[in-house]
Amino acid sequence: MIENQLNFEIEYMQENGRTGRLARDQKAPFAWEFPMQERVLLLRQSGTKEKHLRVSLDKMNQRIQHEYKNWVVKTVLEHATRKVLVSHTQVEIEKTKEEEYHSVINIHFASLGISLVQNFNEAHAREILFVTLQGLQFMLAQSAKTRDYQLRLKYLNVDNNAKLITPYPVLFTPKNRRALKENESSYFLNVLLK
């Protein structure tokens, strides 16, 4: 959902997507035209050729100040919907004082490996499964009104080592592995609970 609280019309789009327009004090639903691309929304005042303001929707409760205009963009959660609010600086500050997070916990593992070992006896222990997790992140953010949880995982790989000679040892891995690793805002798993 995108909400325009400015006193002029704005344009919004995903990169290489169709341009939508939103008049002052209007809301509109938004869905990604290209869900496998970077989740960045491009915004600018309608009828201008100014540079777009880039807003990543993978970050919770962020505020982005436009570099040469007196307006800001804020991403918030409203029930199960992520909402993008575009407003003048003073309006945004007054409306969000109660929404400020007073405590945030962010746990991040760059890489984590989990090995499942079967142990018949001390002489014959063997690994039967290996799980690789990369970019594992858990976030908890709490304000006076809400508590938000987010779990993100950049990459997951599960290897089957149950037999010594396995023709296909990879049980599970994403198809677009390279794109997930190269693109900072792409995640294999991104769950947000409010």
Image (cartoon, rainbow, N blue to C red):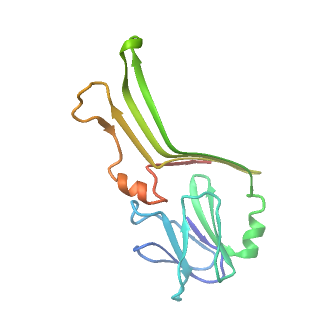
* Left or right position of 144 against 51: right
Horizontally, residue 128 falls left or right of residue 192, namely left
Instruction: Provide residue 14's location: percent of width, then percent of height.
Output: 45, 70
Residue 69 lies, with reference to residue 107, above or below; the image says below
Q: Is residue 118 above or below residue 155?
A: above
Quarter of the image with the N terminus in it: bottom right
Residue that appears at 39% across and 32% down: 130
Residue, x 64% and y 79% (percent of image)?
A: 67
Residue sitting at 77 percent across and 58 percent down? 98
User: In front: 171, or 4?
Assistant: 171
Q: Residue at x 74, y 58 (%)?
A: 100
| Residue that sits furthest to the left in the current view | 167
Identify the image quadrant of residue 97: bottom right
The percent coordinates of residue 133 (x first, y second) are 46, 41
Judge whether 25 appears above or below 140 on screen.
below
Total tally of numbered discs in the picture: 0
**Along the line of sight, which residue is nearer the eye, 96 or 58?**
58
Q: Quadrant of residue 26?
A: bottom right
Of all residues shown, which one is farthest toward the front?
Answer: 123
Q: Nearer the viewer, residue 108 or 14?
A: 108
Q: Is residue 130 left or right of residue 63?
A: left
Q: Is residue 12 above or below residue 144?
A: below
Quarter of the image for residue 94 reads: bottom right
Image position, residue 193 (x, y; %): 59, 47
Which one is in front, 166 or 156? 166
